[in-house]
Amino acid sequence: MSEAIANQPLGNASAPGTTSSLLQVDSLRTVFRQGRREVKAVDGVSFSVARGETLAIVGESGSGKSVTAMSLLRLIPSPPGEIIDGDVFFDGRNLLDMTEDELRDIRGNEIAMIFQEPMTSLNPVLTVRQQLAEPMRVHHKVKEEDIEARCLDLLRQVRIPDPETRLDAYPHQFSGGMRQRVMIAMALACEPRLLIADEPTTALDVTVQAQILELLKDLTRQHGSSMILITHDLGVVARYADRINVMYAGRVVESGTALEIFEQPRHPYTLGLINSMPRLDASEKARLIPIEGQPPDLGNLPPGCPFSPRCPFAVDQCRREDPPLEPYQGQHLKACWVNVDE
Amino acid sequence: MTTETTPAAVTTRATTTPPLRERLGDNKVLGFIGRLIKQRPMGAFGAAICILLLLTGIFADVIAPEGYNHINPIDRLKPPSAEYWLGTDQLGRDLFARIVHGAQLSVIVAFAATTLSIVISAVIGITSGYFGGRFDMASQRVVDGWMCFPDLIILIVAVSVLGPGTWQVILILGLLFGISGSRIVRSSVLSVKQNIYIHAAQSMGASTLRILVMHILPNVMAPIIVLFTTRLAAVILAESGLSFLGLGIPPPAPSWGGMLSLDGRSYMFQAPWLAIVPGVALTIAVFGINMFGDALRDMLDPRMKGAGSGRYVAAVRRDRPSSMRPAGGKAQ
Amino acid sequence: MGTYLLRRLLALIPTLLIASILVFSVVRLVPGNVLDLMLSENDYSASSHDTRADLERALGLDDPIYIQYFDWISDIVLRGDLGESLWRNTSVNTEIAERLPVTIELGVLSLLIALSIAIPVGVYSAIRQEALGDHLGRSFSIIALAVPNFWLGTMVVILPAMWWGWSPPNTIEPFFSDPIENLKVFLVPSLILGASLSAVVMRMTRTMMLEVLRQDYIRTAWAKGLRERKVVLRHAVKNAMIPVITLVGILVPILFGGTVIIEQIFRLPGIGQLLLDSVSNRDYPIITGIFLISGVVVMLVNLLVDLCYGLLDPKVRYDD
């Protein structure tokens, strides 16, 4: 199946010679091993991110979206995790072929990450100054004497009030939203060309969520950086993403522009996600329709399409054969045998 | 990290081990032994040592019928031989027989003192944890005060008051470890107490004694069992340490620690097996109990289980060589 | 910080009071024995105390028990006086003060050895799980946990003496007048005691490091592009040390017990030897004194451990 995807002339994957895409991922596979059990967390995922573009990866928890993000920088704890196949080209260089030293130059420098849990992602025993200065020091981006000024500047950029006094504070003295701002400041320290934000707002209050996302959007626009925004919240995606990949059971099941995905969802799973999302413009009669059933066990997938047991449209072919991700219309791709028109 | 256990995952995990299940049926004990051997081979090895120790203790009189104090002045300080497997001591006593009877003594002291200590820990820990309030405050202050003192100092002082002897040692060790162990029982009682079924039982008007025995005790059994095994090793070490100092079980009783004591030091230079053999016996016994105890703790207390955490530099292992250029390999 | 310290010291008072009652009542459980023992000894029958009652009065043993306790504790609190030895004509204070330096040096040296072996090996063992070094380190700690230190000590005294005629020296030079000679005496005993302590610390360090290495902030550190050395030394070790410090607090009483045994094996004139001598001739004032001192030392060390937390864990604040 991976070959099928790998050999697809993918609409959105850059054609030969195009230099517009900053990141190109091809048939990436990551597994976790527990004894003899093997969990295929990412199972043949391909996509690309253009310069200055924001790509959203959407899916339920356990769909492999976080593992995909971690695999790009090889931030998979190993053991038990292992990347078993695929290529990740960043600006023409394959991250998966790099030595540890080469990879280290990319991490935090060219590609930076923001994690889901601001409460635990900062080291509790180091001050904000120590943690903020670290990426600049290791990547020699800023001269030693300018580091303090740069730290203050970064804290101002992420709109932390009173940065001079906050610089020497410890993470536990910050609220969740403020910590996530510190994380963002840290990620932006070396002006990365790609920012990977793994559910950056999930752990935060609703009011803070919008602020953080606005901030991310503003800052990436200012720097002209690309962003991969990973979320399970379609509402977030609608406002901030240019393009969307919908993931299910470790694969991309639908891919398209934000407009295409929202206006013409072509995969029953995407449809389900949209129907289960509360909308302001919905009529009063419209009810939220949850997706039936449970996400599949990645160590033991059903035959055929992994969504088939939960799919209201499933036909016999779905239970036998796994649908490849194929163009539906231009750059709008779907992995489904059935034509879901309405 | 994103592999949350869905209900489906739980059922499949259970069904991936059918052969073992079928072979062992639903027998809890056999199932436990099966899991022990499969998941913790060192623990199973430790358990085997414990069983060997126990059997040696029980059948000491069969294995070495001449007893531990059969003096034979002609065969003084004989090295190990076919006749005396482990050699003889300064009184011509067979060291093998003394080690075997020493195992018996260790087993008796270890089980008696540990049982006593667990009973004390459970009584103090459960009452203190369950009733809370002033009673808890007062008893915890006393436990605090008691725990300031080094174990060995308490033991030495207590022996100086009660005098040496098997029963004194059992009593003192039981009390000593009982009081310090009550902390562990108390803290598990405190967490169990929060559970809704305890409130349910209280609101249904169950008597306090009933709640303590029927609801609290079964739920703190896991830490108590773990405490029991770890205490066994501690008791054996403490008893042998005391006997080594000449304050434990007095000669001619064959305490392993006593055999190593300073009184026999001068003979050890001529007959090093006198120093080596009891130490090896002690080490093996403590090693076995430790191994078994560790495995038991990991299996009963899932929080302590050390899951693998690798370095965040994922291995990349591909069957095929990677494509050389970003867009080269795949577009026809 | 100052007020915090004061508050902690004040909080020790009730514990100390309970501890002193424990000490006092344990030792006074069988006062008759002392009298009988003393009366049967020549020293006392020849002295002016002919009768049991005289002796009892002279030792203050005829007062009600709470008066005896009150006398005893007020001497200690008001004058720092632990009493007189029953047999030697010296004060308990002098006896203890003479022996204490030996025990302290042995203890401190052992602890230093234990920590300097255990922490690096424990850290290494955690970052290279299942590597050869990890297996060696874990095997060592498993064995060291099972080998009783008195046996190890005995072997070290006996085997080299048999093979090479070497025996550990035991004439102690004061550390500050001749540190080399002094260390020659203390090195082997401290190594033995240190090795058995290091097993526990090593295990704890490894477990805590594994726990810390799983944390999100370690992933953040990797994501910044730090090299492994920095991730481990700067981000992991400090966090892992916080619980290890607690363990040191727990180890101190065990260490105290260990010094008693090691002093006996190597014939070092420390507190442990004084205690054992006093036990064999039932010199209760000395026993009581040592008992009490050991408790106070443990309490003070625990206080010190709590203060150390503040250096490692910024969440610990002293001023609230």
Image (cartoon, coloured by chain):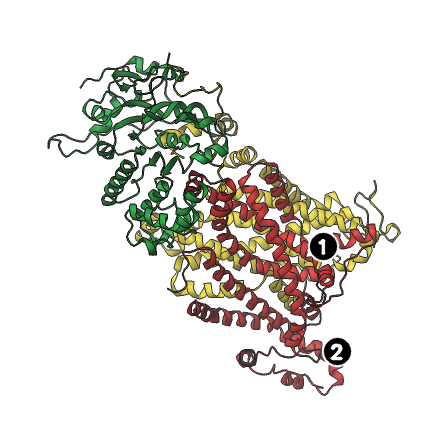
Tell me the amino acid under the disc marked 1: Gly
Q: Pointer 2 indicates a residue of which chain? A: C
A2 shown above or below B307: above
Mark identifier at residue C153: 1
- Chain coloured yellow: which letter? B
Q: Nearer the viewer, mark 2 or mark 1?
A: 1
Q: Which mark is residue B181?
A: none
Residue B242: quarter of image: bottom right
Residue, far right: B74
Q: Is residue A203 visible?
A: yes
Q: Tell me which amino acid carries mark 2.
A: Glu
Which quarter of the picture shows residue C294? bottom right
Residue C98 image offset from top left, x and y in percent: 67, 72
The C terminus of chain C lies in which quarter of the figure? bottom left
State the image coordinates of residue A202 (x, y, percent, origin top left): 30, 40
Q: Colour of chain C?
A: red
Mark 2 = which residue?
A: C41
* In this rendering, position of residue A253 left or right of residue C88: left
Q: Is residue B73 left or right of residue C120?
A: right
Label 2 – label 1 distance at C-alpha: 35 Å
Q: Secondary structure at mark 1?
A: helix
Q: Quadrant of the N terminus of chain C?
A: bottom left
Which chain is disc 1 placed on?
Answer: C
Residue at 48 percent across and 57 percent down: it is B183
Q: What color is chain A drawn in?
A: green
Q: Residue at x 47, y 44 (%)?
A: C211
